[in-house]
Amino acid sequence: DQMKFSWIMSQDMRKRAENSLTISLRNLYLALYNAHNNLKIKEMRYNLAESIHRQNEIKLEKGMITEIEALESEYALEKARAELAAARRNRENMLRSFNHFLCRDIHTDYDDIRLESQLYTIFRDYDYYLGRALVNRAEIKQAERQLALLEQKKKIMDRFPLSMNTVSVRKDYNNLLLDIEIQEARLEQAKLDIEVEVKEAYIEAAAAVKNTENMKKLLDLQKSNIDKIRRLYEKGLVSKTVLDQSEIGYLEFCSSYDLTLFDCNTKLMKLVYVSGIGMA
């Protein structure tokens, strides 16, 4: 039974390590996506700034704008170029970190980096996760198994009452009784610690789900606005520059929503792990 207990513990440790690695990988992937998408947006902003500056140079030659306005657009172009270079370096750094975690060549690149489009799982009430944790958590199962082993040892010793007349055996028996009391206290403490951990993970997940729902409402509003601007552009009521700026703003908001959803899914996943076997 003791050997079986050690084997089960090693299996639990392996699963918990997998859970921890999964969360770590998701955090790295989120950082990589953010850097990847930010680079695409910075490229669009740079192209737009370059286009605006070219237009302003022509306008300056024709006397349609002042030299100060032309210098402002030139400054905006240089700023966009610097931000683009910084975004490119940031993506390279995130890519190296991601590949290093996966034990791949650090220069490995990817054609596209995408996030999820829906929630990882249904979000349930707190009692569901706490009840699940008190049954499945490795710390509780291990403490219960250890307690069962000690009680089994006590039963074996109780089968031979005459041996209690031996001083050394009696001492071992008293120590065993003390070990049982200590293990019972450890089990109760493990339950209290897990309750705190589940509560913290639940609060984080609940806030993330609420934030995602709010972001989805704002995303729908942003989509409605960009569709309106596109229609105005088709009718010739707004310029191409205004449309491009609005498109970039919309893409930035879409990216923010994707990040929010992915972060929410990570917190939901963590809650599932915490209420399951646990994390390393």
Image (spheres, rainbow, N blue to C red):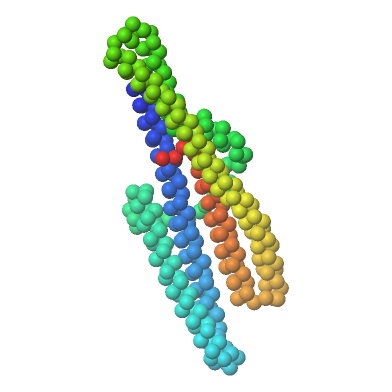
Figure disc tally: 0
Q: What residue is drawn where x is 54% and y is 89%?
A: 68
Horizontally, residue 240 falls left or right of residue 190, namely: right
Residue lying furthest bottom? 63
Vertically, is 165 above or below 251? above
Q: Quadrant of the C terminus?
A: top left
Q: What residue is drawn where x is 46% and y is 71%?
A: 83
Locate residue 10, reporting x and y percent. 36, 31
Q: Foreground: 145 or 81? A: 145
Vertically, is 203 above or below 7? below
Q: Foreground: 74 or 193? A: 193
Locate residue 165, reporting x and y percent. 31, 9
Vertically, is 4 above or below 18? above
Locate residue 133, reporting x and y percent. 52, 34
Horizontally, residue 169 falls left or right of residue 11, namely: left
Q: What residue is drawn where x is 43% and y is 24%?
A: 181
Tell me if I can see residue 120 in this picture: no
Q: Quadrant of the N terminus?
A: top left
Horizontally, residue 188 falls left or right of residue 159, namely: right
Horizontally, residue 147 falls left or right of residue 105, namely: right
Residue lying furthest top? 162
Q: Foreground: 22 or 276? A: 276
Q: What residue is drawn where x is 44% and y is 57%?
A: 32
Tell me if I can see residue 207 in this picture: yes
